[in-house]
Image: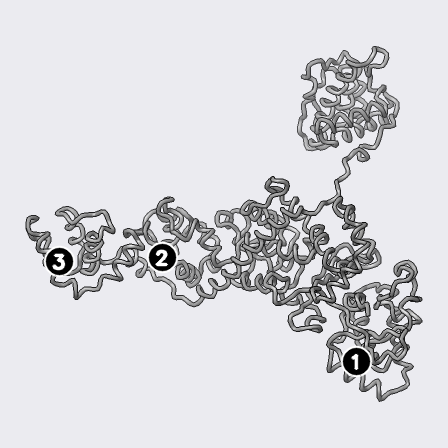
Amino acid sequence: MNGKKLIVNDINIRGVRSVETSSSHVIKARYLNLQGFDLDNKLCFDLHRMFLFHSKDRISSSAYLLIQAIETFFEFINKYNERQPDRLKIDTLAKVHSEIFRAYIRYCQKNNLSLELPSKLKSAIVDFAQNTMLIPIPLLPNVTAFKTKSKPTEPLDEICYNDLINALKLEINRLYEKVNFIERVNQVEPYTLSEAHLDITPPMTKERVFAWYEMILNKEIISKLTVQSLPIKLKKCIDPELLELMNQPNSIMIDKFKAIYERDKELIDTSKEIQQLRKQQGFGLRHWNFDVARGLKTLIANGYPMHKTLDEINVKYAADSCINKGECEDIIQLLILRISRAQSKFKHPEIDNWDAFLGMYFPSMIDAAAIYLMLAIQTGWNKETILSIDPNNYEHVLSGTLSENQSIIFSEKHRSQDSNLPYSSSKEFIAPSNKDDRYSIYNIIQLAKKITAPLQDYSFDYIPMHHKEEDLNPLFICLRYWADWVSKGGRHTSLSQNKAFQTAIKHFINKHEIKEHGKQISAIGDLTLRLRITWMQNKRKKLPLTVIRLIQGHTTKDTTDRYYDNSGIAKQDRVKRLRIEQEKIVTLLRHREFKGIIGTQANQNANTNLGLKIFHIPGQKNSLWGCSNQYKPTWIGSENEIPEGKKCYSIQNCIFCKQIRLFEESVPYLMERLQHLEDSMSDIYQPDSTLIEEKLIIESILDNWNDDNHIKQSARYQRKNAPLLPRNLNDLKVIFEDDYA
């Protein structure tokens, strides 16, 4: 501090034109060169003193930011003073009050300048005032209060949404075809180097010479049979009779050739050679249009790319490792040379470049992007939840209980936990899926597993900082671009890595025409950050709010409402939706158009008391338990969560409610629930008090059941039929809450 005060009080301060930062960088006071910035002016002198005081021994970026702030503030003050009488002009730093500073903030906003500038200037002024006492300590406004509030996230408009869906369906259809192609590649035989050379430069047989001549006769090629063209073919011919013609005078060579052709044409089958000539339109490496499936199988059979070292890939298998086929030591080099060195007019008809070639077999970034986006638009889940889908464990215990074609997909998210839960506790998200729909969540996951199969057995060359290998979800692995393998992070990655995610989505956007208001969507966030709200808007037309809430993982319906109704479109739709919501649900159920999990009717035969509701899980023989009055729950907090006049379906709270009615059939469920509680509590250092209370209640019920024989039978039933319950009882609400019988 003393050092700073010496600078401030130094009578030669006018000669100090730079400051040394904490990193020993000397930063020049650039603002001194501004037109009109004169140290004889008290305000300019104060700003200079402030800069020297505040920036000494701070980091370089802080000093540069303050310089920029002083420059913009000086420009602002000049314009301000031009409109003011002399007595109101700002001519010292001490006169900079809250209203002036507010005007400076608005000036920055109007000119699209970062609010970091007034924020930095404020901190420098206050620091200078507090520690030098050369000016009064000012009361300046909070800069963050002026930051533009982000607009509510709006769903994609209908045209844009349809563009996206059409693009995704095109990509998914392509991926289904790719699966078939992968199977074909796995079945074909690879090329050998010698075979490839024969394809590139086949021997000139009698059949080939005759085929060439016949194509001349049929005018399929523009060549003519002349004393110049015929020897070119004959000198390479392996047929002795035709080769002997090279020794004949030019005057009779053609006639003798025609005579041999007329004599043997019925004996020589030229069809195969003609087909090849038509296909190749010539020979040589640039005309080698090899079979793509066999070409890919050749790479795989020879360990490329995943069984080669990065050093080999960088040197031996680089794009410029060979410049002609004679330099190629193996078939891989030959294939690289054919694809990477061909001029545009000689490109392989099915392959644009090496990345495209590899992408026909291995999962590409475009593939991974399409899979992610389709899952996002189908589930309504956020990025983290989608990227947390376990490819080996994604079907919920309740899958198939209603019908074989219905599946329930789940994923676990490890953020946004309640304050009383540890970070390690996960939050489960569920979504219904129709197995008969090729674009459903279930089938897209299945498709992703098949697409990524070629890379599943390989470790990553590079693990990004702050990541572990298990953090990189194998469901979204993909091959990186060839040029980046060695220098920028290895051969393959996963969309779980943010840079890969950004790159993949960007390439998807660039590939497809997805327009909103006539303008192509170009920013990644303009698409990815709006998928969830778009899903909610569309599903609100088909699904009950309860199902949406469960899929979104919201604790209450209010959360769902707030999230969705934050958009302008939703606000317009809200009144109408509230009026017809129930009617829509009933209609969907009646016409069996509802694809989610549907609540079952109460067991009519068991309901001798019309006020008693018996809960029955589809697919299970035994009833769960009953409720004597769903309109009068007594568990703590029910008055806040269950609106008056509405039925309670809070299954996880039944055990705390006096309305619960337990039957003999309930005992196996209680036993399994007790196991779930014990498992959960063993994983949590400080378990929730609610879990402890629920455990004590169930233990008390079972201890006092007073029928040992039934307890034994129930235990056997539970072991034989497990699992009986989902670990999160809240998941059952998706079944029960829409029961309107």
Mark 2 lies on residue? 290
Disc assigned to residue 242: 3
Q: Classify mark 3: helix, strand or loop.
A: helix
From the viewer's perspective, is residue 388 above or below residue 139?
A: below
Spatial CA distance of label 1 from label 2 is: 63 Å
Mark 1 or 2: in front is 1
Mark 1 lies on residue? 622
From the viewer's perspective, is residue 92 above or below residue 321?
A: above
Q: Please give the name of the residue rendered at 6% of the width and 48% of the height, measured from the top-left corner.
A: 251
Q: Position of residue 211 (x, y in %)?
A: 21, 57
Residue 318 in sight in this render: yes
Asked whether disc 2 touches disc 3, contact meaning CB atoms under 8 Å apart, the reply is: no
Nearer to me, 199 or 319: 199
Three-letter amino acid code at disc 2? Phe
Quadrant of the image containing the C terminus: bottom right
**Quadrant of residue 98 within the rendered picture:** top right
Three-letter amino acid code at disc 3? Leu
Name the N-terminal-most of marks 1 and 3: 3
Q: Please give the name of the residue rendered at 75% of the width and 58% of the height, measured from the top-left corner.
A: 548
Q: Is residue 165 left or right of residue 676?
A: left
Name the N-terminal-most of marks 1 and 2: 2
Q: Classify mark 1: helix, strand or loop.
A: loop
Three-letter amino acid code at disc 1? Asn
